[in-house]
Image (spheres, helix red, strand yellow):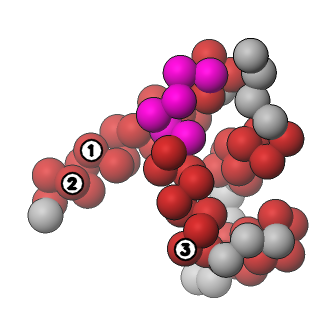
Amino acid sequence: MDLGQRERDILALERRGFPGPGAKERAIREELGLAPVRYYQLLNALLDDPRALAADPVTVNRLRRVRESRRGER
């Protein structure tokens, strides 16, 4: 079973770089039509989805490392 379009769009957004503060949140709202809080909830769930890992292992593994390092800081 493949990822849905929204899940693929979230991963694509995470592969991009953003020029300054607020640019990513603006892109989340404008391109995906999501509130940033909801976006990050969906992203976090997506990082635990084996389909996401199969679809984009580089991005998913990078984001998992970031998530784990932030959890370690708490």
What secondary structure is the magenta-colored segment mainly? helix
Q: In this view, does 6 lie above or below 70?
A: above
Label 1: which residue?
68
| Residue occupying image coordinates x 53% and y 21% | 50
Label 3: which residue?
37
**Mark 3–mark 2 CB contact (< 8 Å):** no
Q: Tag on residue 71?
A: 2
Marks 3 and 1 sit apart, C-alpha to C-alpha, by 19 Å
The secondary element bearing badge 2 is classed as helix
Q: Say few, some or many: other residues with alpha carbon within 10 Å of mark 1 (under 14 / 14 to 19 / 20 or more).
A: few
* Residue range highlighted in magenta: 46-51
Which mark sits nearer the N-terminus, 3 or 1?
3
Location of residue 42 in the rendering, given as x and y in whole percent from the top left corner: 58, 54
The foreground one among 20 and 29 is 29
Marks 2 and 1 sit apart, C-alpha to C-alpha, by 5 Å
**Mark 3–mark 1 CB contact (< 8 Å):** no
**Mark 2–mark 1 CB contact (< 8 Å):** yes
Location of residue 17 in the rendering, given as x and y in whole percent from the top left corner: 67, 57
Relative side of 3 to 65, left or right: right
| Residue occupying image coordinates x 86% and y 66% | 31
Marks 3 and 2 sit apart, C-alpha to C-alpha, by 18 Å
The secondary element bearing badge 3 is classed as helix
